[in-house]
Amino acid sequence: MKRIFMVFITSIALFAFSIGASAQTTSGDLTSSKAMKLALSAREHFWSVMGGHNVKAENYFCSSRSFQYKGQYYRYFCSEFDTKIKLVNYMNEVFTLNAIDKAFKKYHFIVYKGKMAQPDADGGSLADWKNAKAKLIYQRKDVRLYQFTVPVPIDNKIVETFKQNVTFVKVRGKWQINDFDAVR
């Protein structure tokens, strides 16, 4: 009887949470403007994760310790991402769990001595996503595919643009991006 009661209470709590989350995160359909805002947020999340710390976090501790593991150099993530739960929760603000799982494999994120770590590498991008243009090219009930035309300025002049397709998926009433590095 206790087990049935616990399952019932857990179900009610999960249902209430999902309704609350849906009420907060669902604001109608995914327009080009909303897709653009989500893409910019995803870009910020991507580069925060790749840099090892949340660029908007305050009062974090970051150990620049590097180590070698299986012939490759790694560095620890900063305190706000030092556990897998913290890192996944942050990434899941804008990315699907499928995208996160693929990112962990692609970018070789590991847990080493109880803390999250990533290969020691630097990166960057000149792409000007703030001035990108979004165009809806495909839609289903809970899936949208937008094509972004992204300028690449050099010396404050647009010298080229590129097109990037980004898939948005509605998960529990919230639009998320289904590819971790779609907007890097």
Image (spheres, grey):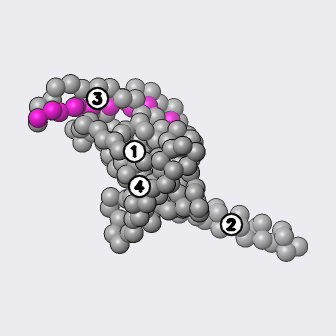
Residue 149's disc number: 3
* In the displayed structure image, the side of residue 148 where residue 82 appears, left or right: right
Q: Nearer the viewer, mark 2 or mark 1?
A: 1
Dot 4 or dot 1: first in sequence order is: 4
Q: Nearer the viewer, mark 4 or mark 2?
A: 4
Query: Disc 2 designates what residue?
Result: 12
Q: State the residue in front, 170 or 130.
A: 130
Q: Amino acid at mark 2?
A: Ile
Dot 1 or dot 3: first in sequence order is: 1
Q: CA distance from mark 4 to mark 2?
A: 37 Å
Q: CA distance from mark 1 to mark 3?
A: 28 Å
Q: Amino acid at mark 1?
A: Ala
Which segment did they paint magenta? Answer: 142-155
Q: Quadrant of residue 59?
A: bottom left
Q: Mark 1–mark 3 contact, CB under 8 Å?
A: no
Q: State the residue in front, 60 or 129.
A: 60
Q: What SS does tag 3 mark?
A: strand
Residue 121's disc number: 1
Q: Amino acid at mark 4?
A: Gly
Residue 142 against residue 66 in the figure, above or below: above
